[in-house]
Structures are given as C-alpha cells and as structure tokens.
Amino acid sequence: MKTQQLTAYNKAVRDSYAQILKQARQMLGSIEQEELRFMLVREDKFSGIGTVINELINPLLYIRLEHHTDDTYAIHFGFEQISKSVELSTVTTQFVRLLYKQTSRDSTAVNIEDCVRTDWFVNSPSEMYQYIEERGLRHHTFKQLLYKPKTAKRKLKAVA
C-alpha cells in the first residue's frame, strides 16, 4: 500500500475499533453480575510494527488493536461460548455482529474488511483473563465498568 492509502486504512481501522470498543463497553456495563463487568486493559505507549495499541480482556469478550507485521492495523477478537444464559449469549452475539458491521465495506470510506484477523482466535476469554490476572498485571490495568441497565430494564424498574 502507498503511504497515503496506508494512513487512511489505519485511521479507518482505528476509528472503527474505537466505536466497537465503546459499544462493547456499553454492552458489558449493562450486565448485572459484577464479576462480568471487570476487565483488563492494555495500552502500549510505544508505537510501531508488532505493538499492541489497545487490548480489552473481559471474561466474556476479547478485542485487540495491534500494529500488524505488514504495517497495517489489525483487530483480533474472541468471545466466550455461552450456552446457559440468553442474556450473556445476546451480549456475545451482538459483539460479533458489531465487529463485522463496523468493519464492513458499507460502514467505512476505506475498505477495511481484512483488518479483522483470525490467524489466532481467543475462544476462552475467561481463561485468558484469569491467567493474566493471576500472573500479575505487568502490561494490563484492572478496571471495572459501572452497572448501567439497558433503557428497557430501567423503565421496568421505574414502573415496578
């Protein structure tokens, strides 16, 4: 890619990632269970090929923006397999839809569909979260989202 194209591509990927991250945090914040609103966040201060620009690890979701080896930005993701909770399954399903919607050719001025990489995939963010938490937070910061019920839940509670 030429420099201008690469710059536009990386900006579009970064902007889409920011939207995905914002909405993913909103989804996680709507979960009543406190332990599912915990997350580990990583933001590297250095930039350049091979760096992690941003990473969010949560027991349900995983998303990472990195400066890939071909000098483009790439998004890696993962989600927990949910079979017993409709509410949590809805969160993971919405996350996958959001990821692909925000990076689709129809949603961006620059075609960034190939930024979503599956050369490796996190299929158990809860195990990854636990592992990083137990080994110490060298690169990550522990954060907790405040509980903000979805509008429909708030209205139901107000009526009750």
Image: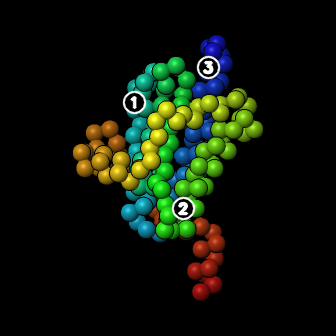
Pointer 3 residue: 6
Pointer 2 residue: 89
Residue at 48% x, 56% y is 81
Residue kind at label 2, given as amino acid type: Ser
* SS for callout 1: loop
Q: Do tag 1 and tag 2 residues touch (Cβ < 8 Å)? A: no
From this viewpoint, which residue is outermost toward the right? 106
The image shows residue 47, relative to residue 30, as above or below, that is above
Label tally: 3
Q: Is residue 143 visible?
A: no
The image position of residue 1, as x and y in percent, is 63, 15
The image shows residue 103, relative to residue 38, as above or below, that is above
Residue at 58% x, 62% y is 90
From this viewpoint, which residue is outermost toward the front? 83
Q: Do tag 3 and tag 1 residues touch (Cβ < 8 Å)? A: no
Q: Is residue 4 left or right of residue 118?
A: right
Which of the two residues, 93 or 46, is positioned nearer the viewer here?
93
* SS for callout 2: helix
Residue kind at label 1, given as amino acid type: Lys
Q: Is residue 113 visible?
A: yes
